[in-house]
Amino acid sequence: MGKVNILLKQSYTGVISVIGIIAILLLGFTLFGHGVITSHLEWEDNFMPSLLFFYGFSTVTLIFAVIGGFGVWKEKKWALILFAVGMILGCLYFIIAEIIGIAVLSQEEIMLKNKYLNLLPLSNMSDTDISLLVYAQSEFHCCGLESSRDWENIPESCKCDEDSIDLCVDASRHIGNLNDPLNTGPNSIYAKPCLPILIQHDIRIFHIALGILFGFMLLWILSIGLSIASLCQMNKKVDTPNVVYSTEAKAGNYSCLTEALEDG
């Protein structure tokens, strides 16, 4: 069995170390996100499937990185084969996901708009969706989906600060406030609707996700190539000279010395 070239071994170790570090960081972020979602129980139903996916993905990736490192340093063929097969399956998943993502990218804006408009009226929204919209209003300085009139009673997250640089309007123009004399909502609210902002924000995240997915795919392909190259070097036969015993071989100088002593 041949030996793996030290340069190839170091390159392969470096690549799978990067993959392992990514898996550890992803697992850490997933744990942190799980803690945040646990503190907001109303978000749990929406985000739990994604959390379970990231838990599984990061754990499996880390396990394969460890197997690959063990295989190249101990020069175990079964470990390198198992690593290569696992990475090939992961790479196929990335390729399929990338193709699907690019295919739906052109229709993403329409799909997102329909998704958000289906939430109207806001009075029929679930507590989870309302809490997410309230958070978006505070974060992006907007109010309502299409306008502030989407709310029956304007929440405090629509309140526009006096020193805000964003365009604000008088809350008395809001129909809900006029119909509800007991309303204690804000007097000045953000003029921008949230729908265009949410759509652009989601599309930006979608682009970033596709870029990260493409980077993962290239890294996975590189690790597969290095793993296969290591296997090829291990399967390479090493040429060794054959030692053949012959009865006609000369005894060498010792026989001459023996003969000289016998003659003397």
Image (cartoon, helix red, strand yellow):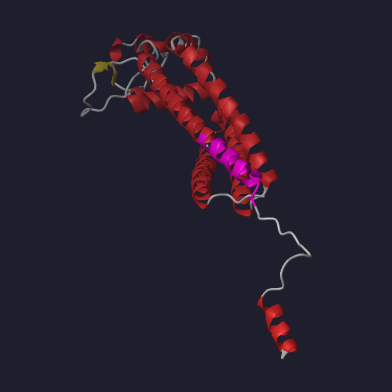
Residue 97 in the image: x percent, y percent? 54, 22
Label count reads 0
Q: Nearer the viewer, residue 76 or 257?
A: 257
Q: Is residue 236 magenta?
A: yes
The residue positioned 65% from the left and 34% from the top of the image is 85
Q: Nearer the viewer, residue 147 or 106?
A: 106
Please give left or right for residue 92 compared with residue 170 in the image.
Answer: right
Q: Is residue 95 above or below residue 113?
A: below
Query: Can residue 127 be seen in this snapshot?
Result: no
Which quarter shows the C terminus?
Answer: bottom right
Q: Nearer the viewer, residue 224 or 6?
A: 6
Residue 48 in the image: x percent, y percent? 59, 31
Residue 67 in the image: x percent, y percent? 63, 46
Q: Is residue 136 magenta?
A: no
The quadrant where residue 235 appears = top right
The residue positioned 43% from the left and 27% from the top of the image is 211
Q: Is residue 238 above or below residue 225?
A: below
Which span is picked out in magenta? 222-239
The residue positioned 22% from the left and 27% from the top of the image is 162
The quadrant where residue 184 appears = top left
The residue positioned 56% from the left and 20% from the top of the image is 96
